[in-house]
Amino acid sequence: MVKKAQLKIQEMSFMLLATVLFFILVGIVYLAIMYRGIHSQKNQVEQDRAIIVSQFISQSGEFSCGSYCVDSDRLMILANITSYKELWPVSYIKVQKVLDKREVKCEMGNYPDCSYIEVFRKDKINDTSSASSFIALCRYELVDSYATRICELAKLIVGYEVK
């Protein structure tokens, strides 16, 4: 009789142990699934932030010369100001002329005969993706002694970090 009781106690303890291990494994699987969901939500938030920054640049009074028109002269000045580096919550901001196939970065010496303006770039960049929108990139030039606005089709590219 005592041996039967001990056997039942052992069976019960093994069942309790198996049940606890089963729920621990279910909890680990649940946490892994939730972590993956949080990870993808973080990437979605970063993408949304990049889209908001691109809308801000294309519509703000500091850079805009109209609806979805960006003043390239102002961008060139902003690209050379280092105090704005902490302002941007993204990895990089770049304005690429669409019809220009060259890869010539705009500097003060070669402007406007260049293909892209790098407004901002973080020092340390890991894996990135980008959101972009088309804009009119405009500047003023003297043509026959008149200030003329010259616009080109460009792409505003805002990069964000992906993990």
Image (cartoon, rainbow, N blue to C red):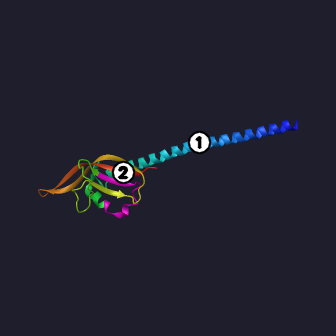
- The mark found on residue 142 in the picture is none
* Rendered position, 8 above or below 45: above
The N terminus appears in which quarter of the rendering?
A: top right
Res 25 → quadrant: top right
Q: Which residue occupies 29% across, 61% down?
A: 77
Secondary element under disc 1, as helix, strand or loop, is helix
Image spot of residue 46 (x, y percent) = 43, 49
Q: Are marks 2 and 1 in contact (CB under 8 Å)?
A: no
Picture mark count = 2
Q: Is residue 93 magenta?
A: yes
Image spot of residue 45 (x, y percent) = 45, 47
Query: Which residues make up the magenta segment?
Result: 79-95
Image side of residue 123 versus residue 115, left or right: right
Secondary element under disc 2, as helix, strand or loop, is strand
Q: Which residue occupies 74% across, 40% down?
A: 14
Which numbered mark, 2 or 1, is in the foreground of this view? 1
Residues at marks 2 and 1, CA–CA distance in whole angstroms? 35 Å
Q: Is residue 9 magenta?
A: no
Question: Which residue does the numbered mark 1 point to in the structure image?
Answer: 29
* Rendered position, 15 above or below 107: above
Q: Which residue occupies 23% across, 63% down?
A: 109
Question: Which residue does the numbered mark 2 point to in the structure image?
Answer: 158
Residue type at mark 1: give it: Val
As drawn, which residue projects farthest toward the right? 1
Disc 2 residue crowd, few under 14, some 14–19, many 20+, Cα 10 Å? many
Res 119 → quadrant: bottom left
